[in-house]
Image (spheres, rainbow, N blue to C red):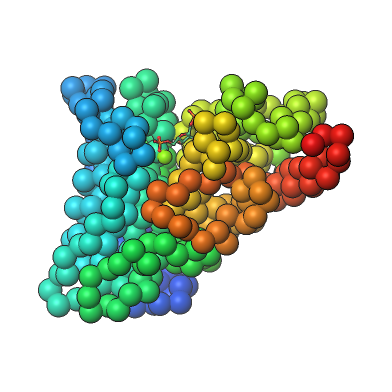
């Protein structure tokens, strides 16, 4: 007999008791995000058909050009998260400041949601996978008032849930509430995310390394040595240029993803709050590891500002440990300093 289909909504409700605050609020929030993901997926799929591609004209808060689909995804997420009244505010890679949301029908909203609405924006125009990343925290400010900056500047270890959606050959939503990682594939014929990857475990080691090797000469010496070593070990290089897609491969097939500091980005390029923290929470929950290039655990970094950047080394636990040992050995060797 074929396995019974379990939809995302059904799964979230069944798992409600898995997390510490089993009030149903987080359930509502995850469902809102699922709805937004379906809407964004529809637009991503028909982006080639309608004339909404190209630069939107505006710049995001980090000074990069914003494409129309990014803004669309940003707006839809905000709209969906405003519906149920569980979210008191959002922060997005596309908004300079956080956005407090209006209270709904005398509800006290307990959560804030942070997201990168469309990760991998340089890939939109050329039909290569893009994604959405989200991160959920319980607010620390009093529930009766508006949310405040301190609600968003929490360490990654405080996340109550995180996930991503990859708009690839199929659309998959992967999330964790701190009790394992599960994946859901969108069945377009019924318009539902269906449980397809139960209790995802990252392989302990793997054959892939993923880094923008074009910046080789801009990396620190020990990083260059490490990359040489990956090549000497005959690891396979894969780099899509969409963090979500590159890490998704590693989550299933094993490997290591690195975005180190470069001369252009001395603190790394990726955003701690919208990219590094949620992906690190997911990967750790699947048995992997995530550190920065100073070899500190990503989830323990105290954010200084909303758009703070970080270097990142993430993936199979054995490979992250090996990278750490490699860098420690070479930085301790005066011949290499
Ligand atoms: P984005 O969120 O504006 O799309 O930027 C983040 C992306 C990541 O998805 C990807 O890993 C990285 O930027 C690629 O950067 P680069 O082109 O420097 O390799
Ligand atoms: Mg991004």
Q: Is residue 220 above or below residue 252?
A: above
Q: Mark yes or no: residue 199 visible.
A: no
Q: Is residue 212 above or below residue 156?
A: above
The x, y position of residue 274, in whole percent, is 42, 49
Q: Mark yes or no: residue 54 visible.
A: yes
The x, y position of residue 61, in whole percent, is 32, 41
Residue at the spot x=82%, y=34% of the render? Answer: 336
Position of 231 with respect to 75 (left or right) is right
The x, y position of residue 206, in whole percent, is 71, 39
Position of 247 with respect to 67 (left or right) is right
Which quadrant of the figure contains the C terminus?
Answer: top right
The x, y position of residue 76, in whole percent, is 22, 47
Q: Nearer the viewer, residue 153 or 279?
A: 153
Position of 53 with respect to 304 (left or right) is left
Tell me the quarter of the picture where residue 224 sits.
top right
Q: Nearer the viewer, residue 107 or 187?
A: 107
Residue at the spot x=40%, y=26% of the render? Answer: 123
Tell me the quarter of the picture where residue 72 sits.
top left
Position of 324 with respect to 334 (left or right) is left
Residue at the spot x=68%, y=34% of the render? Answer: 220
Q: Is residue 111 above or below residue 213?
A: below
Q: Is residue 248 above or below residue 144?
A: above
């Amino acid at each position: 007999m074929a396995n019974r289909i379990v939809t995302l909504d059904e799964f979230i409700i069944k798992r409600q008791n898995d997390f510490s605050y089993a009030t149903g609020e987080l359930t509502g929030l995850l469902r809102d995000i699922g709805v937004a993901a379906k809407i964004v997926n529809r637009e991503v799929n028909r982006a080639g058909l309608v004339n909404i591609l190209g630069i939107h004209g505006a710049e995001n808060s980090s000074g990069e050009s914003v494409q129309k689909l990014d803004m669309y995804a940003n707006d839809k997420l905000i709209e969906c998260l405003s519906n149920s009244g569980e979210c008191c505010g959002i922060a997005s890679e596309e908004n300079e400041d956080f956005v407090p949301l209006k209270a709904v029908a005398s509800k006290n909203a307990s959560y804030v949601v942070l997201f990168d609405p469309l990760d991998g924006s340089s890939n939109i125009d050329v039909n290569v996978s893009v994604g959405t990343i989200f991160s959920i925290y319980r607010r620390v400010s009093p529930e009766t008032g508006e949310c405040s900056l301190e609600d968003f500047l929490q360490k990654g270890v405080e996340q109550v849930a995180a996930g991503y959606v990859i708009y690839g050959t199929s659309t998959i939503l992967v999330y964790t509430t701190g009790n394992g990682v599960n994946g859901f594939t969108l069945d377009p014929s019924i318009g539902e995310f269906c449980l397809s990857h139960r209790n995802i475990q990252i392989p302990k080691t793997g054959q892939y390394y993923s880094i923008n090797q074009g910046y080789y000469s801009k990396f620190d010496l020990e990083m260059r040595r490490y990359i040489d070593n990956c090549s000497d070990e005959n690891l396979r290089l894969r780099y899509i240029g969409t963090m979500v897609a590159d890490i998704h491969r590693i989550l299933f097939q094993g490997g290591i993803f690195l975005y180190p500091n470069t001369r252009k980005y001395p603190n790394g390029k990726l955003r701690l709050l919208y990219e590094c923290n949620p992906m690190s929470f997911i990967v750790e929950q699947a048995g992997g590891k995530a550190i920065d290039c100073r070899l500190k655990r990503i989830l323990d970094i105290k954010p200084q500002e909303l758009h703070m950047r970080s270097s990142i080394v993430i993936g199979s636990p054995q490979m992250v440990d090996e990278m750490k040992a490699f860098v420690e050995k070479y930085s301790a060797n005066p011949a290499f300093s």
